[in-house]
Amino acid sequence: MHDVVTFGEGMVRLSPPGHLRLEQTHSFELYVGGAELTVAAACSRLGLSAAWVSRVATHPLGRMMANRAREHGVDVSRIVWSDDGRVPLCFRETGAMPRGSLAYWDDGDSALSRIQPGDIEWSFLADAKLLHVGANTPALSAAAADATSAALVHAKRHNCKVAFDLHRRYAGNIDEALMVHVDVLVGDAEDIRRAFGVEGQPEEAAAQLKERFQLDVVAIPLPIAKGVRSGVWTGIVVGDKLYTDRTYDLEIVDPSGARDAFIAGVIYGYVQNDLDMGLQYGNALAAIKHTHPGELCYFTEQELRDQIETTGRALKR
Amino acid sequence: MHDVVTFGEGMVRLSPPGHLRLEQTHSFELYVGGAELTVAAACSRLGLSAAWVSRVATHPLGRMMANRAREHGVDVSRIVWSDDGRVPLCFRETGAMPRGSLAYWDDGDSALSRIQPGDIEWSFLADAKLLHVGANTPALSAAAADATSAALVHAKRHNCKVAFDLHRRYAGNIDEALMVHVDVLVGDAEDIRRAFGVEGQPEEAAAQLKERFQLDVVAIPLPIAKGVRSGVWTGIVVGDKLYTDRTYDLEIVDPSGARDAFIAGVIYGYVQNDLDMGLQYGNALAAIKHTHPGELCYFTEQELRDQIETTGRALKR
Amino acid sequence: MHDVVTFGEGMVRLSPPGHLRLEQTHSFELYVGGAELTVAAACSRLGLSAAWVSRVATHPLGRMMANRAREHGVDVSRIVWSDDGRVPLCFRETGAMPRGSLAYWDDGDSALSRIQPGDIEWSFLADAKLLHVGANTPALSAAAADATSAALVHAKRHNCKVAFDLHRRYAGNIDEALMVHVDVLVGDAEDIRRAFGVEGQPEEAAAQLKERFQLDVVAIPLPIAKGVRSGVWTGIVVGDKLYTDRTYDLEIVDPSGARDAFIAGVIYGYVQNDLDMGLQYGNALAAIKHTHPGELCYFTEQELRDQIETTGRALKR
Amino acid sequence: MHDVVTFGEGMVRLSPPGHLRLEQTHSFELYVGGAELTVAAACSRLGLSAAWVSRVATHPLGRMMANRAREHGVDVSRIVWSDDGRVPLCFRETGAMPRGSLAYWDDGDSALSRIQPGDIEWSFLADAKLLHVGANTPALSAAAADATSAALVHAKRHNCKVAFDLHRRYAGNIDEALMVHVDVLVGDAEDIRRAFGVEGQPEEAAAQLKERFQLDVVAIPLPIAKGVRSGVWTGIVVGDKLYTDRTYDLEIVDPSGARDAFIAGVIYGYVQNDLDMGLQYGNALAAIKHTHPGELCYFTEQELRDQIETTGRALKR
Amino acid sequence: MHDVVTFGEGMVRLSPPGHLRLEQTHSFELYVGGAELTVAAACSRLGLSAAWVSRVATHPLGRMMANRAREHGVDVSRIVWSDDGRVPLCFRETGAMPRGSLAYWDDGDSALSRIQPGDIEWSFLADAKLLHVGANTPALSAAAADATSAALVHAKRHNCKVAFDLHRRYAGNIDEALMVHVDVLVGDAEDIRRAFGVEGQPEEAAAQLKERFQLDVVAIPLPIAKGVRSGVWTGIVVGDKLYTDRTYDLEIVDPSGARDAFIAGVIYGYVQNDLDMGLQYGNALAAIKHTHPGELCYFTEQELRDQIETTGRALKR
Amino acid sequence: MHDVVTFGEGMVRLSPPGHLRLEQTHSFELYVGGAELTVAAACSRLGLSAAWVSRVATHPLGRMMANRAREHGVDVSRIVWSDDGRVPLCFRETGAMPRGSLAYWDDGDSALSRIQPGDIEWSFLADAKLLHVGANTPALSAAAADATSAALVHAKRHNCKVAFDLHRRYAGNIDEALMVHVDVLVGDAEDIRRAFGVEGQPEEAAAQLKERFQLDVVAIPLPIAKGVRSGVWTGIVVGDKLYTDRTYDLEIVDPSGARDAFIAGVIYGYVQNDLDMGLQYGNALAAIKHTHPGELCYFTEQELRDQIETTGRALKR
């Protein structure tokens, strides 16, 4: 019995120390990420029972991805281990104004992109409350698109809710047919414009989609970059009404995974029928994620509650 | 013959590199601190003859604490080496707005907390100008409180001045009886409120205490945090009159030890009967301490004078 | 339903890089260990369902211990999280002939040493095949000794087998009354001599104990050190008969955890009624553990089988 | 056939990690620099054929300097390798407001300072478009001053243009006789004041010099420091007219080499008769140089063009 | 005009620090390798004019490969830069007896494997003395096999000699038709057996091949592993006669690239018609390569000559 | 009142991590050494009152040298701080058989080489038991040679004993006139041959010198290298009789400072009139020094005694 099941690709991120450029570095720091793995890890830390489903290469770095998920309490027993396909990599260097941070994906021919029909037996979703997938998963390959469809169909058939992240990189190639299964949609104005051609302010565009696809919730991340090192985070949710929250001033260490942390918070609220709390958790989580390295967010629920209750400035130094 | 003797606990600080969270790290950087050790080290660098008195475990990390003090020129020959008791540790992670930095103290059952009457022969204070202790020392244990009392009594008996830091964490448990021995008190409005229930603006509260306890000097650190990475430092001194000084805009690397650096500057001025100079040294020292890692401040007197004479903005890059 | 449950203390090991001495270092590398945690992790990697039971402080390093166990697939849901007590630490420096490696334990007042009757509900052992404890666990405190007794009594009552490691450091203080519950005993000639005053060759001493305590198995690690960097590993098992195995020539990187890896292999064979295979696995595991840093052994079952089938010299470089 | 030849000293920079002070560090990071080496490297990356001419000690660090230049595509075949003289070193620590960064040069008795007449056969300048030297080169020694004169005389004789950087540290000791050979002069108002006693706004002072020495171009770097971590960069060029460009807001990582990057951009435009483009390239290069460690700038021409076309704020994070 | 041209793939090697296993590491050290790049670099250091020809992705790591080759003096102007295809990676962990070192290649879909006919204009080989290729190059893809054939055909047509390494991993798939172009063959008894089914002692098998393919030279590396950390190196050459050399006792740090260093030495002798010297250089180079990390060998010709003249034991410590 | 005063140069050693070659490295680890500083530090750790006398540049690395000496308890108050002259550097890379370790000294124009007559007031030697100098000190410059003579003359005049190390690098240039002041001479057969042309077995050559210069003691280090990583250490002393000691089998980490550690042990015994104990201490110290990085030996007297009493093989792993 899972509260949340996520389906997608893990990846190993390789980053030069500090602000060294990729071409210049002589070493890499390793972090494990992947949008759906990250969402599952944050959900697990929030106390939900979470599983991450994927197809992973039997490679030390494949095991590393599973280990890291497991470290955060994620159930990895549904992973399909494969002897073919690669472990997705991402080379990421940290910028400083005016040079932006850059990510070079080396994720072709991944084990998940080679998924076969029947590799995953989706019937276990009958015992799950929510399935989360991002637009990146069906974009991997025709086979991955088929698997995503299968997952969503099974979820719906078994009364398992579906959350879907439009995901900036892949928003332009969303298969609209998937939307019929979706309950919780994640995206900002630009994602929505790319995916569905809907223009306008995020809350209006969200309201339009909500009606068009009969969604329960549209969750909208609204970060503002002031530089590579500083910015502001907030997010809003369009559900039965518009939910808004405080903004967080950020001294940014690493923004990776902040969007996924936000999603985890919203899902946490959604599965407990408390969108207001979910939004607050999501925003606080996203803010905290900016303050330490890596995609995966390290926090305790107590810290999160403290964060929500204090102002951003009343911090210990 | 010592200008300054300090009495208190050393500690070894263990910090993850950069902004890694404690739970997430795979390595620690080590720094040696402890409020009184730090004050002694800064006094020694300022040219005073300084000794640090403590009870330290015969453990490699205990020797490391003494070595680091000795490196700064501090006389460690008065340390009582013990086969019982622990070396105090402090795990400290660096935050970034909105997440504050966090310190987890693991300093229970320290060698100093097990001090025995007679372990330290305080008569050598007869040759010292000033003894400095913080509220943390008597707070360690009943035995440490007794030893602190004994030290202060001996100091006063031998015309050795006494400086006492209210120390935020322990300000609420100050034994007011100690105050009769004190000449120089360190604390801000909040410390004073916690320790003595005196409310009000720092200079007013200080003036009140000065009269009540017949103090020579109250030194008040007045830092303002703007974030984890930036802030402002100044301090003031209430002595024969109110001394104020410039403020320093700070790009903060590590605020640890800044308060102790400030105290060292004030003591330096106090033992030379030049509170104005002492305040300027204290503020400049505290400002410089924010700019490099560790509790102990690395500086030369020349650098300090240059700092005082330049504006904070006219810096070399 | 668990194949193996272990009960004991986790610890965080802090080691200087390379061959730096503790007094000399400016950083530490972190590893998670603790004999029973380590045994559970190796059992889990061998494919057994394993749980580690302990009382752990709600501290980032406490969570780190649980995370690391979880990373290896160990069930940590039986951990009792406590707000009191410390996270055990071990400072370990690596020697080189003629200077031996040294470990300084800083494990006083641990959360587990403060365990309360009833903190752990041992009835879940009814669903377990084997409980493993080492002599270090009852040695922590009277409370921990009581908890160990309770665990062994429950295990026996529910037909759960019991493995017990005499553990060099604590072999001299074994409560012989515990032996009545034990099925698998681990110790070498020196451990046996210290614990029970039985002298003689290890296989003979083991045979004597086997009869005296009606043991199923005595597992005997037989490492020979040639220096800090090289040595030889083998182990034997006295069960229904004497089982012996090849020896492994070792280029030693870190011997920590090798004994526990050996125990895991023996347990693996024991719960599957194949002591011969168990001994081979245990020896190969112990050999591999010497070749990489840390207490926890990183391996795949395939690598283990390859190791067993090849000679020690026919290695890839 | 070279587009650009530079003549001057390379150096190895030794910097403590992060913000550690030099006195405090236990390790150094190495970077290769030297103004003329740096200019040649940036020119080479811009697509020009560039050679760096120097006299370098046959020492591993000497080879390291040549290797690093070669890595950027610089022709190092004109280096005179010597068995006498040192490899210049520079110890540099990074400050934080109010403590400025500090450089301690240890470059006495360098191999280049011992250059002999005839060591370099300058006739190859007949095939070069431009020779670049900075005021630091003739300041090394009388021999180096003679070699610089010889180089400039040869350049002019063979219709090779000459660029000359007044270089803050040495601007006060410029031999004005060299100016007769110069076509492109680099310096800001302070450099010009020190070198020639000309006061006033940079563009006016530059115009005055332009006429006095019949220069083609005066390139003026105009950085503004806001702290050690932030500032603003722009530069202007006084040529056939006054060229100005946008300013760049900077999150500063390491300003080393920014001036040289700017010079490389101006030279790039100058040898292609497009000062406007050269200024834009120079400013963008200088801005990018601030964002990563080291003297040498790592960039692609595509990145540079992207930088010029975007605003400083529209960055990826 | 080149003395040596090599054709093949570069790669970036990612290795955990020390003896950490891949699954266990949190960082990687980077080294650039690739058999033909490595041979070219060593030839260049020996004073030959060397070029490395390849098809490389326009990626920071692609530029890193070219930079590293260039750092060693290799001409990289013949590289075909491509927007498609990957940069080959190799994850390599260091073992310790009995665990061997392991390499996981992630080199599928490389830029070179996608080479197109005409991408490289081989006519420049008319000005080269020798072309070196290994069996790994044609094994990449049909396209790479075609390119290899084209290269060898051009070489022979223009009187450029050809060296060919059977390369253990790919020896089993050699296209025997290529052998008609080859002058210098590299391989040991096992390579020869796999490639041509010829059994027997290496010198005999070599002599047989020499006749069969009308080779000038067969170079045979003969390392003996005693463990991961120690071994013995020698190699022999079958040319106009059998050349043998001393053996080197090795304290092994990293054997990567040793075979290629050996090849470079043999080529150096071959192009100068001094096989005896070439063999000595090759063996000394291979021995030195074992003593420092990375594929590329850092040495000076002077060091090499010193190595040849001293015994392996008379070393400075 | 000092037991031991040493006079000579400190230095900062810069070493690449692990086995990286100097040309290849991107970082350095720092260690403080200098033969006389090292001897003083080891003497201080043995419990003697020790001072290190030198002329040191007012530079962060100069302060670092003094700090490190002070950390070991050495009195540095006799240092003459100078604004001229350099801090001596030594670049040292670690070899592996057959490549020996290499040191590149960059110690020209040191502050000590510029010493002026009268800089040091040697009369304080009247309160010292022994002065130690090595042949490297007078070899620095004529001024340093004069200062060395002055020191020895003063020592003798005040009944302060003199120890002198022939020091391999400088043994060939010893001023024999100095020998008249010497009581304890350090050197092996090769040093003695170079210095005085005396051939033969070390104990015989030593006996000859003892008579010729009326020495009390000749101490002879007798290390045998088996490789860079392994070797054997012993030393002997020719005093009133021949003293010999056990040999130590070594797993070598860093041999730097081992000779100085040996000297410190011999001095320790000499000033206490127990050459037998001194030799044992010296050999044990030298052995331990091989097992950790750096010139300075980190040990406790207890460890030393344990080392002497155990055999080299009975080590903890």
Image (tube, coloured by chain):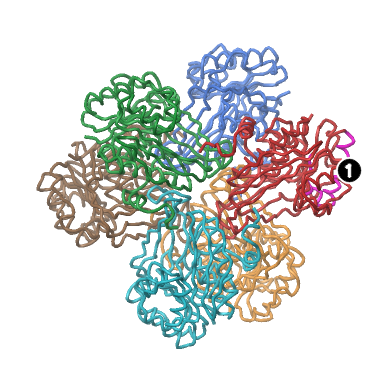
Chain colours: A blue, B orange, C red, D brown, E green, F cyan
Q: Which residue is drawn at 11% across and 44% down?
A: D159
Identity, as a three-letter code, of the amino acid under mark 1? Val
Furthest-left residue in this view: D157
Left or right placement of residue D166 versus residue E314 in this view: left
Left or right placement of residue E172 versus residue F3 in this view: left
Left or right placement of residue C60 versus residue E93 in this view: right
In the image, A125 versus E5, the foreground residue is E5
Vertical order, C281 against F244 (above or below): above
Task: Give the percent coordinates (x, y) of residue F86.
Answer: 36, 66
In the image, C176 versus D311, the foreground residue is C176
Q: How many marks?
A: 1
Please check the rendered image and state whether residue C134 is part of the magenta-colored stretch, yes or no: yes
Residue that mark 1 sits on: C180
Q: Which chain carries label 1?
A: C
Q: Is the magenta stretch mostly helix, strand or loop?
A: helix
Quadrant including the C terminus of chain E: bottom left
Task: Give the percent coordinates (x, y) of residue F47.
Answer: 59, 74
Instruction: Bin the neighbour count of mark 1 within 10 Å (Cα to Cα): few under 14, some 14-19, many 20 and up.
Output: some
Task: Give the percent coordinates (x, y) of residue E300.
Answer: 33, 49
Task: Give the percent coordinates (x, y) of residue F15.
Answer: 44, 55
In the image, B248 versus B296, the foreground residue is B296
Left or right placement of residue B60 versus residue D255 in this view: right
Q: Is residue E67 visible in the rendered structure shown here? A: yes
Please check the rendered image and state whether residue A261 is part of the magenta-colored stretch, yes or no: no
Q: Is residue B204 visible in the rendered structure shown here? A: no
Q: Magenta segment, which residues?
A: C132-158
Quadrant including the N terminus of chain E: top left
For numbered disc 1, what is the local secondary structure? helix
